[in-house]
Amino acid sequence: MRDDDSVPSGSATIALPENLQRHAWRIIMLAVVFFFAVSLASCVYPADPCTSDLQYHSLTVYVRDARTGAAIASGATVTVSGTAGTEVFTFPPQATADSGAYLSKATTPGTFSVRVVRPGYAEWSLSIEVRSDHCGHPVQAVVPAALTQL
């Protein structure tokens, strides 16, 4: 072996013909693009498939006292208006502190107007946009209706 043919210790080089070098770079770039596309696709297409087996509700309204935070649903009337129509629900007088929530029958995304009235409290209202998930189902919005005592 001649001195000029020796390879310094700790490094090794492989001399490839120029056409093979171009192919090697193409293969490396294709692999990078492929792995990037696969990782991007996993974000765009989640693992859970779209299904219509479940019912998705648009809104849950919690009726609370603005000062104390206590549930005050007893006797309160919740009105939810959206593109599909208007629904009205009045909590029964015997509603307990645990039953301060109303689950809307609306099952579509969109803009909703929520109004809550209860004797002894100021009227409360809100307009809210309910978005949809990747399948078109509504992403349920939680509406904390904090009523102020008169």
Image (spheres, rainbow, N blue to C red):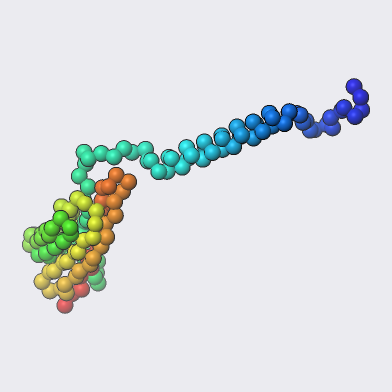
Q: Percent position (x, y) of residue 16?
A: 73, 28
Q: Is residue 12 left or right of residue 52?
A: right
Q: Report the number of discs.
A: 0
Q: Nearer the viewer, residue 132 or 143?
A: 132
Q: Is residue 136 left or right of residue 31?
A: left
Q: Which of 15 and 120 is in front in this view?
A: 15
Residue 48 found in image quarter: top left
Q: Percent position (x, y) of residue 38?
A: 47, 37
Residue 20 found in image quarter: top right
Q: Can residue 87 be spotted in the picture? A: yes
Q: Percent position (x, y) of residue 42?
A: 43, 40
* Direction front: furthest residue: 19
Q: Quadrant of the C terminus?
A: bottom left
Q: Residue at the location (40% across, 43% down)?
A: 44
Q: Percent position (x, y) of residue 9?
A: 83, 31
Q: Residue at the location (51% across, 40% down)?
A: 36
Q: Which of 59 and 118 is in front in this view?
A: 59
Residue 20 vertical position relative to residue 132 in the rendered view, above or below: above
Q: Quadrant of the N terminus?
A: top right
Q: Can residue 74 be spotted in the picture? A: no
Q: In this view, does 117 lie to the left or right of 12?
A: left
* Direction bottom: furthest residue: 150
* Direction right: furthest residue: 3
